[in-house]
Image: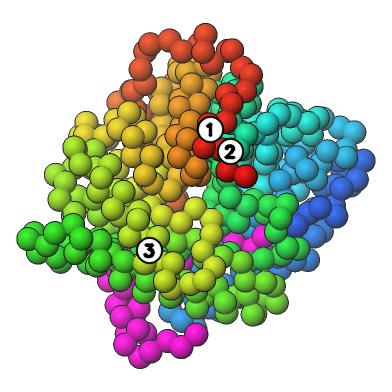
């Protein structure tokens, strides 16, 4: 691809003044050839393969940063869902595999490694159940391992037995990391319609349909988009706002395309996808909420927020899709509360509630993400919150997710702190009305009639 001099100058300005970065270069690695009846052998096989395939990722990313002057914030690895790899094992506890993954991530200098995962939208195998039951110990005993469980699709409906199990598992994970505000749950995502090529944590894994290895890039640039929108006249109509966002995201995506293809060439692995997502950080000026407010809201959460987010998400997709032929992952605007300074302020000011966030997830790219709730919230209530979000994804044929943290010992109005990109957030109140009978019923919520598309 040809990059013009003007594009280079503009990119330098966006990096220096507007916090443009490549949020992640994620190397996907298949572990399907690591199976063995012994869990210790599987763990050794996984460690050896990660070290062999991933040894050049960090050096290449650092070289690209220096050469192009563009920060690459995270260097990550995603792997085949461990439930598939470990099902051959006689043992039931898969946490030794998580520990091997964590050790490899540390030795390679990787920020996070994703794929302690299972796909259970229509039921469980023995390996799936072992994986789910291993999640609390696996995430509490490791630093860099992330887990995800897909419990619903638009074709299969919602596995409410899995949803019920995830309510319990999230509670257990938080209990085991109570001294750090339940950080284990911050590394666990429950999905509907999960993509197989998502480079963003904590939901990344290397899907069964992916090649042996692939490099996927997640772009970011809320600060750049916010600057462009803030410069617009208040007389500009919403069509003009959308057009400016599209043009800006096109430029941001061109940067991601350049880095992705160059990383692919230097690593000697196939180029996978560009995830066209605006992913915020806790840093001031790097916020999705600030963009929505620049569009015309006093505070994120005010009436009009869902419509403004729909406009933003659509413009991101349209602008990015013109800049690359390989769009994938989640692609759109993320609204994680603890990772977005503007969202945190909106919650603290009382403008943004859990119910408003749920409405916003109908039009964004993820779901209820990085939300802290009172530690005494029951497993059944958490399951019901997950079920609501899964229903949004299933009915709307979109990916949606829940990453929720019932912070041990904390009540509404308290705060949690996870550090780094995970940030910190006020603890949000949850409805006190009971959903336990619904959550305990289990079974399968059938897919919607729209699933009959064959």
Distance between mark 2 and mark 3 Cα atoms: 28 Å
Residue 46 forms part of the magenta stretch: no
Q: Nearer the viewer, mark 1 or mark 3?
A: 1
Residue shown at 64%/63% (left/top)? 27
Task: Evaluate if marks 1 and 2 touch, with contact meaning CB atoms under 8 Å apart.
Answer: yes
In the rendered structure, does residue 24 fall within the stretch colored magenta?
yes
The answer to whether residue 203 is above or below residue 451 is: below
- Whether residue 238 is visible to the viewer of this picture, yes or no, is yes
Sequence-first disc among 1 and 3: 3
Q: Which colour assignment does the render follow?
A: rainbow
Secondary-structure class at tag 3: helix
Question: In this rendering, does residue 173 appear at all?
Answer: no
**Quarter assignment of residue 343:** top left
Where is 22 relative to 198, above or below? Answer: below
Residue 342, x across and y down, in percent: 27, 47
Front residue of 171/259: it is: 259
Magenta highlight range: 1-28
Q: Cα distance, mark 1 to mark 3?
A: 28 Å
Q: Residue at x 56, y 54 (%)?
A: 198
Q: For this view, does 287 lie left or right of residue 106?
A: left
Of the two numbered discs 2 and 3 on the same chain, state the one appearing first in sequence.
Answer: 3
In-front residue for pair 41/436:
436
User: Residue at coordinates 75% horizontally, 57% vertically from top-left?
Assistant: 30
Mark 3 lies on residue = 318
What residue did someone put label 1 on? 449
Disc 2 is placed on an element classified as loop
428 sits to left or right of 122: left
Q: Quadrant of residue 6?
A: bottom left
Please tell me the numbered disc located at residue 329.
none
Give x and y (percent) for residue 84.
78, 43
Q: Which mark is residue 452?
A: 2
């Amino acid at each position: 691809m040809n990059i013009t001099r003007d594009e280079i100058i503009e990119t330098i300005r966006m990096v220096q003044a507007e916090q443009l970065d490549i949020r992640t270069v994620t190397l996907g690695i298949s572990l399907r050839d690591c199976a063995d009846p012994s869990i210790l052998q599987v763990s050794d096989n996984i460690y050896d393969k990660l070290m062999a395939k991933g040894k050049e990722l960090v050096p290449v990313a650092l070289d690209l940063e220096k050469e192009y002057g563009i920060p690459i914030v995270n260097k990550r690895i995603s792997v085949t869902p461990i439930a598939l790899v470990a099902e051959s094992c006689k043992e039931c506890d898969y946490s030794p595999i998580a520990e091997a993954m964590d050790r490899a991530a540390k030795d390679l200098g990787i920020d996070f490694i994703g794929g302690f995962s299972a796909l259970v939208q229509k039921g469980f195998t023995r390996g799936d159940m072992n994986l789910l039951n291993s999640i609390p110990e696996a995430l509490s005993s490791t630093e860099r391992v992330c887990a995800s469980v897909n419990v619903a699709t638009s074709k299969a409906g919602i596995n409410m037995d899995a949803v019920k199990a995830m309510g319990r598992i999230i509670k257990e994970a938080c209990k085991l990391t109570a001294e750090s505000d339940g950080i284990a749950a911050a590394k666990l995502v429950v999905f509907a319609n999960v993509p197989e090529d998502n480079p963003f944590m904590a939901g990344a894994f290397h899907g069964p349909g992916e090649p042996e290895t692939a490099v996927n890039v997640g772009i970011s640039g809320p600060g750049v988009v916010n600057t462009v929108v803030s410069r617009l006249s208040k007389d500009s109509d919403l069509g003009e706002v959308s057009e400016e966002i599209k043009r800006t995201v096109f430029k941001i995506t061109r940067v991601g395309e350049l880095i992705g293809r160059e990383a692919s060439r230097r690593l000697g692995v196939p180029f996978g996808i560009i995830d066209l997502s605006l992913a915020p950080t806790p840093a001031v000026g790097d916020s999705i909420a600030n963009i929505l407010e620049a569009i015309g809201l006093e505070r994120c959460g005010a009436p009009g927020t869902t419509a403004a987010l729909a406009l933003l998400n659509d413009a991101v997709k349209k602008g990015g899709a013109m800049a690359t032929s390989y769009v994938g992952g989640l692609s759109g605007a993320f609204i994680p509360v603890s990772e977005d300074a503007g969202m945190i302020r909106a919650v603290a000011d009382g403008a943004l509630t859990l119910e408003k966030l749920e409405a916003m997830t109908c039009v964004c790219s993820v779901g209820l993400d990085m939300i802290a709730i009172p530690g005494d919230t029951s497993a059944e209530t958490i399951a019901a919150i997950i079920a609501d979000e899964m229903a949004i994804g299933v009915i709307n044929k979109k990916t949606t997710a829940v990453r929720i943290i019932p912070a041990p010992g904390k009540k509404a109005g308290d705060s949690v702190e996870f550090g780094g990109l995970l940030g910190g957030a006020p603890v949000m109140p949850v409805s006190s009305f009971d959903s336990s009978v619904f959550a305990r019923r289990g079974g399968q919520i059938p897919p919607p009639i729209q699933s009959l598309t064959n």
